Image: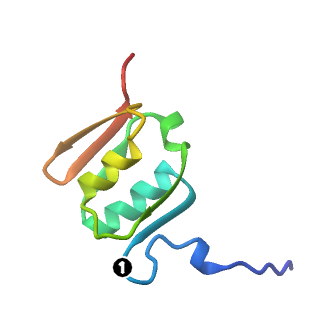
Amino acid sequence: IRRNTFRGEEYTAVSRGGGLRFLNETLESIAQQLSRTFDCRIIIADPELSEVRFYAFFTNRESLDEILSTLNADGTMCIERHDQVIRISKRQQ
């Protein structure tokens, strides 16, 4: 048996005040949390992309589209939305 101590507030997406906080989380983990928060399905088409890590804070009740746009600030992702299904893939060069 091994006992570890951790600060739970560093590992939760929903912070006090209703914002979202992602600390060194993979896009896959973020997509799962956003799916639950916004009641949608997010598919990451590229396994390599699903392992990209992010640090991001959203405290102004941003929409799902605003959050995805911010995560894609470097333009490396192609985000397609069809109703409640969002597909994220690598942007073709």
Q: Looking at the image, is 81 positioned above or below residue 48?
A: below
Within the image, what quadrant is residue 38 found in? bottom left
Q: In which quarter of the image is the N terminus?
A: bottom right
Classify residue 8 as left or right of residue 61: right
Q: What's the amino acid at mark 1? A: Gly
**x and y, in percent, of residue 58 in the image:** 39, 65
| Residue at 33% from the left image edge and 49% from the top image edge | 68
| Residue at 71% from the left image edge and 78% from the top image edge | 6
Viewer-side residue, 30 vs 24: 24
**x and y, in percent, of residue 31 in the image:** 40, 55
| Residue at 46% from the left image edge and 78% from the top image edge | 15
Viewer-side residue, 91 vs 56: 56
Q: Looking at the image, is 26 positioned above or below residue 37?
A: above
Classify residue 62 as left or right of residue 51: left
Q: Quadrant of the C terminus?
A: top left
Where disc 1 sits, the SS reads loop
Circle 1 residue: 18
| Residue at 33% from the left image edge and 61% from the top image edge | 35
The single residue placed furthest to the right in the displayed view is: 1
- How is this picture coloured? rainbow
Category of crowding for the residue at label 1, using alpha-carbon neighbours closer than 10 angstroms: few (below 14), some (14–19), many (at least 20): few
The single residue placed furthest to the top in the displayed view is: 93
